Image: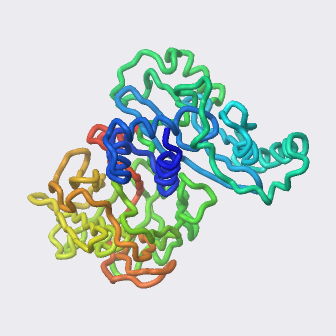
Amino acid sequence: MDADALRRVADWFHDREGTFRPRTGAVSAIARKLDVDATRASKLVAGLTGDDVDPVIAVRTHEETFVGILDYREGDGWYGYTDYHDLRGPHRRGVCAQCVHEATTDEDVRTVTTTNEDWDALEAELGDHYERAHPDVAPETVNVETGAILRSRTTVGGNRVWHTGNDGAGSGFGAASVDGLDGATLNRRHSSDVDRHLDLNRLGLRAWYRFDRGSGGTLYDYVNVGSNRNGELRGPTWVSGRNGGSALSFDGSDDYVALRDSYATSGALDEFTVCVWYRSSASSPTWSFYDFDRSEYFQFGFDSGGGGDIQFATTDPGNSQDDMYTSGTSWNDGSWHLACAVYDGTDKYIYVDGSVEGGKSGPHNGAAIGTGVTRYGYVGAGSESNSFDGNRNNNNFEGDIDEVRFYTRALSGSEIRAIYDGVA
């Protein structure tokens, strides 16, 4: 297989680290990127998801296969990534970069794994490996390259996580077992503190603000614990949320949450989904639930003209901006609603309470979203910021927000309904 093409495909996945997307969508995007046919692109993707030395993994559900890089790290003379198993949860895998240079097949490369949350154990074990196997090589001098072009002697899908079913209500799988285990066995494992970490509605989840602390000045992202995607409160107050939890109340004037998350890449978002639990009884509600600047990336919130319609605005690399809205129902009735905005790479949709309330076909002619201008995000305000907590456009949300999820893939209608039903 063409080594240069494999490297280019590997780079494509690395540029989208943290993004999981349907395999068919990835194949189509790679075919366009490399100007090859779909069969060739599919073989290139398969060449990166079949062994332990490639950070690209594939997760197959009953309905679809998703591919991407969950997490990637480089150290002196090694690299590592996060792999997943539905029952055993996440594990870190470290790979010796010197072995990659010396080996002809992936089975000749030293790899180590750990279930620890940090990378220290992997780095220590690979350091011991260098002393034994490469005593004359200083790890810090090794050029780190992944094993994308190494042949696999024995594996076809060795790095894949295969799922024969899912016992979660609303999953739509309808299977009697999960990875060969019946519900009773799974329940026993759950009672024994064996977590079920993987869920179809977690794939591609870039940020998840659950608003469940109920106090303090930080809004925590539960996908990337300890990361720079947390938010800092600037005025909103903690109040009771839906289902007995907590929420933040925004006054519509100068309250907002500044997010330590940003975009600065042209075409940064091939597809994405935003879901927000909110309530508002404002007579003339304005932006914004979740915002990275409508004229640079996207905005999701109420129509800036008031009236209770929900607006989803996006801009592509050619600076073509599209604003779409719901119509016919005012969603500022003081009740809790789940509003979701979806861009699937071609079409746009707005869901409210699990049902489609607006849609538009091909507003960007298949282009990705984002101009490349640096923009930091906000909850409750419109962004104009090229730095953390910078400029805003004074379109502030009035009401309460209980939860925000951001996915770097397009969720299906059934997945959104599962979130609305509280089973995802």
Q: Residue at x 45, y 69 (%)?
A: 263
* Nearest the eye: 413 or 107: 107
Question: In which quarter of the view is residue 367 placed?
Answer: bottom left
Identify the residue at image location x=81%, y=54%.
Answer: 139
Q: Could you tell me which residue is drawn at 38 percent across and 82 percent down? A: 392
Q: Which residue is at a point 23% across and 51% down the rendered structure image?
A: 351
**Can you give x and y, in whole percent of width and height, for residue 188 in the image?**
60, 20
Is 267 situated above or below 122?
below
Res. 339 visible in picture: no
State how the image is colored. Answer: rainbow
Whether residue 124 is visible:
yes
Residue 227's x, y, as percent?
Answer: 60, 61
**Quadrant where the C terminus is found in the figure:** top left
Q: Nearer the viewer, residue 268 or 137?
A: 137
Q: Quadrant of residue 236?
A: bottom left
Q: Is residue 352 left or right of residue 1?
A: left
Residue situated in front as seen by the camera: 316 or 236:
316
201 or 396: nearer the viewer: 201
Q: Position of residue 208 (x, y in %)?
A: 47, 54
